[in-house]
Amino acid sequence: MTSAEPRGPALTVFTPFYKNIEYFDETIASVLSQSFRDFEYLMINDGPAAEARRIEEKYADPRIRIITTGTPLGLSGSRNAGLHEARADLIAFIDSDDFCEPARLLKQIEFLRANPDHILVGSALRYVDERSNTIGSRRYPEGDEEIKKRLVVVNCVAQPSVMARRQSLIDAGGYTQEFPCAEDYALWLRLARFGKFHNLQEPLVAYRIHRQSGKHRLLRPALRDTTRLKIHAIRHYGFRATPRALASIAAHLVLLAMPARVVYWLFKRTFVS
């Protein structure tokens, strides 16, 4: 009589990291202290091996599994590696400068278990500064119909808040290099044809605003890629060229003509308040 195969974790929590580790300990602590406990914490290290060793020695938690790439993969490559290395059918994302609220995983996994026709659940965000002080918040459309209606107008799925069915992400092509500064948005636009989306209205993730963040450093490339992506989605993914969609593209073109510091100020005035 053969013994049964050991059961894998119910969930993979995933963080890619490179040298963006200033706030990483707060991220790790927020994951390991979740009220839901049946998960592996997968990290793809695209940088020096020393940081991986430090994490393993400091936390000594059997749920942590770190893969060091050796050859740099970049953000999209690291995220794809995470999709394929994950051991669970469900995967939750959290970036290395953000952190989870204590019940985040429990609330999202309960939603996906109760709604098998949904392939992705996100949440509202709480914006924090370098010292983790709350400086604002942002909510996104809640139900699938409203999310899909607005998705080509604005990215209304926050990457670090997402929990999704891993195979659906792979079937949609995963993260690609076609739009390198909007690779998450590109995936949501392709994924929209595969099943339903939902955003919980409670802020379950703290999103950090700081000068080293991609939002600050890569603002103009992100605007450029987002503009190209919206046009591509209308032409190739079946999204309609509604007046709001076209107005959003025009607005991006105007923003691209402005100095980056002005655009960043407008972003903070609009969303961080």
Image (cartoon, grey):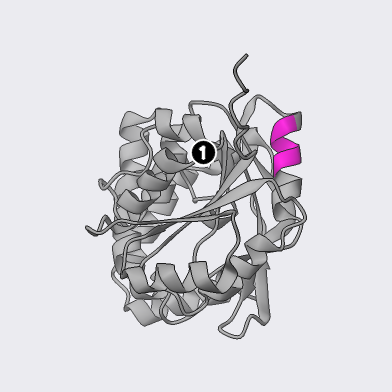
Q: Residue 98: in sight, yes or no? A: yes
Residue 70 x/y as whole percent: 25, 59
- Left or right of 4: which side holds 191? left
Residue 135 x/y as whole percent: 65, 79
Quadrant the N terminus occupies: top right
Q: Toward which corner of the image does residue 16 lie, by quadrant?
A: bottom left
Disc 1: which residue: 87
Residue 112 x/y as whole percent: 69, 35
Report the residue at 30% width, 54% height from top: 225
Q: Main secondary structure of the magenta part?
A: helix
Q: Tell me the SS state at disc 1.
A: loop
The outermost residue toward the front is 1
Q: Toward which corner of the image does residue 208 lie, by quadrant?
A: bottom right
- At label 1, the amino acid type is Arg
- Left or right of 166: which side holds 1? right
The one nearer the camera, 135 or 32, is 32
Please determine whether, in this image, residue 16 is positioned above or below residue 142. Answer: below
Magenta stretch: give its range: 109-113
Callout count: 1
The outermost residue toward the bottom is 131
- Left or right of 29: which side holds 214? left
Report the residue at 68% width, 38% height from top: 143
Report the residue at 32% width, 62% height from top: 46
Quadrant the C terminus occupies: bottom right
Q: Toward which corner of the image does residue 125 lie, by quadrant?
A: bottom right
Q: Residues within 10 Å of mark 1 (few under 14, many from 20)?
A: some
Please determine whether, in this image, residue 51 is positioned above or below residue 174. Answer: below
Q: Residue 192: in sight, yes or no? A: no
